[in-house]
Image: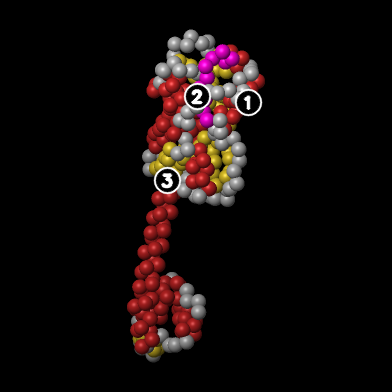
Amino acid sequence: MNVSLRQLRAFGAVARLGSFTRAAQQLHITQAGLSGMIRELETQLDTRLFDRTTRAVSLTTAGQHLLPVAEQTLEQLESSFASLGRQAALARRTLTVGATPLVASCVLPTVIRRFAQQQPDLTVRLRDIERDQIQAQVEAGELDAGFGVFLSSAVGIQRVPLLKLPLLLASPADSGLPASVPWKMLRPLPLLALPVGNPVQRLIDDQLAAIGRANEERPEFNNFHTLLAMVEAGLGHAVLPSFAQLSGPRYRVRFTALSQPRVSLDFFQITKKGRELNPLLAAFSSTLSDRLG
């Protein structure tokens, strides 16, 4: 049995109006088409639903039993369709993104404010979570996109580089360093670091190895904010991506360009492979790139 929604609507219209002619007019179909749908429904149910005379159309006993079921089914389906429509409309106006705590606290508030000014009827939901959680939630479909430094690809994840961010040296505000220094000038400086497994730190360690400072013991901190606070306190220097300088007002830290060589890392947008992109994502990513660029 394969009873269709169109058949139930046709049956309900004829039962309610007591006329094939008026029901066909209301449904905007031909009377012949309506009659065909009712005959097919009766064939599938193996019972007559209407008694037809030249003057009237009335429900049979079977039709009387079917009518409340059909009406309830139609009401529930139409309510569900309306709810799905509202959810789809809300989804089209909502973008859910994830970023690591430093990016989330120092970069994205301004980006979200600018985006809201440009698109006042849209909503951005931000989750400040660690890098591995961002990838997991993107792959699970819980985030429309994640933003950050993802140096290695992952199964099920599409990486799109938004821009390149140079590495900078963060020093105490009174360090007196010039605006730019070569990497070799880091040889005598006490250095603080992110954990060894952090992809940003791995890139930094490759450069430190070239100046003879590979595999040395350094104080390590998981959180960029802790690292910057330690630098502010005069407990060492740290090499960080340039977006860290957007935290400037919070910490008395001087940022110095690193040269010879100039080293940059890609800042990525990540999404789930095969998933349709949220239509708001391109405009949001553009606003984010403008803020970081």
Label 3 vs label 2, nearer the camera: 2
Q: Which residue is mark 3?
A: 94
Q: Is residue 147 depicted above or below 232 in this figure?
A: below
Q: Secondary structure at mark 1?
A: helix
Q: Which residues are magenta?
A: 186-195
Residue type at numbered disc 3: Thr
Mark 2–mark 1 Cα distance, whole angstroms, equals 18 Å
Report the disc number at residue 156. none
Marks 1,3: beta carbons within 8 A: no
Q: Secondary structure at mark 2?
A: loop
Q: Is residue 246 depicted above or below 152 in this figure?
A: above
Q: Which residue is mark 2?
A: 219
- What residue lies at 35% left-to-right and 86% top-to-bottom? 58
Q: Is residue 66 depicted above or below 140 in this figure?
A: below
Report the disc number at residue 206. 1
Residue 64, given in percent of the width and then of the height, sits at 35, 84
- What residue lies at 38% left-to-right and 66% top-to-bottom? 78
Mark 3–mark 2 Cα distance, whole angstroms, equals 41 Å
30 in the magenta segment: no
Mark 1–mark 3 Cα distance, whole angstroms, equals 40 Å
SS assignment for the magenta stretch, majority? loop
Residue type at numbered disc 1: Asp
- What residue lies at 42% left-to-right and 75% top-to-bottom? 8
Label 2 vs label 1, nearer the camera: 2
Residue type at numbered disc 2: Pro
Using the rendered image of the protein, determine whether residue 284 is visible from the camera's viewpoint: no
Labels in figure, total: 3
Q: Secondary structure at mark 3?
A: strand
* 64 relative position to 214: left or right: left
Number of residues whose C-alpha sits closer than 10 Å to that of mark 3, classed few (under 14), some (14–19) or many (20 or more): some
- What residue lies at 41% left-to-right and 62% top-to-bottom? 81
